[in-house]
Amino acid sequence: MIHPSMPALEILGFVAAVLTTLCWLPQALRTLRTKDTKSLSLVTQSSLTLGVGLWLIYGILLGNLPLILANAVTFVLVVLILAMKLRYG
């Protein structure tokens, strides 16, 4: 089994964090701009928000910076989308 060095693992974590976090930015911006949330599932968005919140707590408890940063930013974005869904249906 290959054992990558910790810096390589951290880089991998940060790259994954950036990619999975930034993918929510276009949806959040579109939702803010158009206020159109009809095509978004309330159950899915609520589950995602809860899941990301739990990942954030998990990252904090582990002290894992890539998990913390990625999930903190993602949490803000998905909460924003969820709030818009609740407000505009």
Image: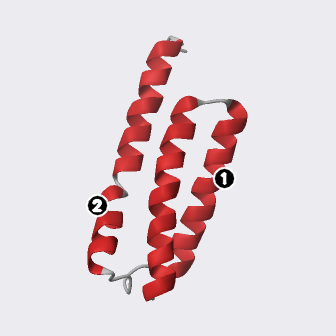
* x then y, percent, for residue 67: 55, 38
Structural distance between the alpha carbons of marks 1 and 2? 23 Å
Q: Residue 17, labelled with which disc?
A: none
Amino acid beneath label 2? Pro
Q: Which image quadrant: the N terminus? A: top right
- Under tag 2, what secondary structure? helix
Query: Does 36 sit above or below residue 26?
Result: below
Q: Is residue 83 visible?
A: yes
Instruction: Name, please, the residue furthest toward the right.
Output: 61
Q: Tag 2: Cα neighbours inside 10 Å, few (<14), some, or many (≥20)?
A: few
Q: Which numbered disc, 1 or 2, marks the residue that appears first in the sequence?
A: 2
Residue at the spot 33% in from the left edge and 81% down from the top edge: 35
Q: Nearer the viewer, residue 18 or 4?
A: 18
Check disc 1 and give the amino acid type. Leu
Residue at mark 1: 54
Residue 4 visible in the shown view: no
Q: Residue at x 38, y 82 (%)?
A: 37
Left or right of 30: which side holds 82? right
Residue bearing mark 2: 26
SS for callout 1: helix
Q: Position of residue 21 (x, y in %)?
A: 41, 48
Q: Which residue lies at the image location 35% right of the left edge and 49% below the top edge?
A: 22
Residue beneath the point at 46% across and 67% down: 80
Colour theme: secondary structure
Residue 18 screen position, x and y as percent = 38, 40
